[in-house]
Amino acid sequence: MAASTRPLGRYRWAVLAAGTGAQAAYIALLTAPAVLAPALRDDLGLSLTQAGVVIAAPWVGPIGTLLPWGLLADRVGERRVLAAGLGLCAALTVPIAFTSSFAAIVALLGAAGGAGASVNSASGRAVMSWFGPAERGLALGIRQTSTPVGTAVAALALPGIERGGGLEAAFLFLAALTLTGAIVGGAIVRDVQGRSVAGGARRVLSDPRLWTIGASAGLYLIAQVVITGFLVLYLHDERGFSIQRAAFVLAAIQGLAVVLRIALGRWSDLLGDRIGPLRVVGLAAFATLAATAAVLGAPNGVVVAALVVAGGTAMSWNGLSFAAAAELAGRERSGAAIGFQQTILSATATAVPPVFAALVGATSWRAAFALVALAPLLGSAMLSGGRVTAAAQGR
């Protein structure tokens, strides 16, 4: 069902809720290997580096599918793209529950991640269609709470499910969750009529401002992936936490990230600027992660508090970055712009876990965290150019 004029009524909040829920279901699948890493390692006999490969696996497929999904959403609308991709994702997740092969699990996670990636561009484009510039920061901030919400669902639900029914039950739960997201999203999200544009990929890929914002986002993501991807393993192996107890710490990070994403989105609306707050977040991520590295030898309470603050800060930037990219590209190409940026993020998320695991093995957790802290600092510096800032403010 398509609306004939730009909708500003209350239904926009239903669209936002459905898109956020569908995205959260997909995020739960992406982060599940990190939560289940100790169980996967024990069941499959994996090394730390192999565990890093499994953690990265769901992010491999989206590298090749995110931009095509975004272009398709620009062409045929958000509703069909969201439902089809997430439905296929659910179908590909089911066989993961019934295999014990390391290679098969990696391949299936990659394929499922590539299929479900449709929800990224579809739900982001829906926000661009249903919300005006004065509300987009808040709306995309709410939509981006899907990452901490989905991660929290995985962190709180999967350890108990795995303990009671094994990895089979855990992955069947994830399949059901993504299928639910596809059904609800397909039922509620409505496309907004607009002119179809040609050359979306070319226009997006040739815009240096979008490359700058995307590269900066990739650097920001390094800290996020490291903390969320390795927190459970670190607390379990180095601090003696149970998987359930470590997962609760991961859930606490997600709670802080939800608050920060919404608050930063609203702040950017009030300022009429996405880039300035985005730069501040990069500096804060550097400071909190560097502080975490410095206190790793402290008692558990101090380390956990530092990890929660650093993790929440490292996860707070996404809505601002997507808003800046989508607004620069314009609504007609917003699906392609979001897909392009998410492609950069998926490539980063794929590369980081194995590299970080190898870095920890070659040095130490402290040295590895300290090195990762430099990434958001560099990302913030990349956004200092006046051209990107002026463009984002002049949307």
Image (cartoon, rainbow, N blue to C red):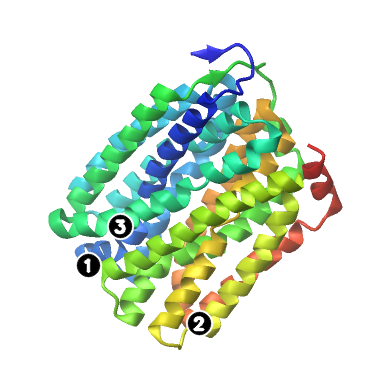
Residue at image mark 1: 42
Q: Nearer the viewer, residue 191 or 205?
A: 191
Q: Quadrant of residue 247 in the image?
A: bottom left
Q: Secondary structure at mark 2?
A: helix
Q: Amino acid at mark 1?
A: Asp
Residue 211: % across, % down = 71, 47
Q: Amino acid at mark 3?
A: Leu
Query: Can residue 99 be seen in the rendering of this structure?
Result: no
Q: Secondary structure at mark 3?
A: helix
Residue at image mark 3: 156
Residue at image mark 2: 366
Q: Is residue 310 above or below residue 20?
A: below
Q: Earlier in the sequence, mark 2 or mark 3?
A: 3
Residue 166: % across, % down = 16, 56
Q: Amino acid at mark 2?
A: Arg
Give how far apart the Cα atoms at labels 3 and 1 are: 20 Å
- Quadrant the C terminus occupies: top right
| Residue 316 appears left or right of 87 | right
Rate crowding at label 3 as few (under 14), some (14 to 19) or many (20 or more) other CA atoms within 10 Å: some
Q: Quadrant of residue 24 in the image?
A: top left
| Residue 177 appears left or right of 215 | left
**Which mark's residue is nearer the viewer, 3 or 1?**
3
Residue 58: % across, % down = 40, 49
- Farthest residue toward the left? 164
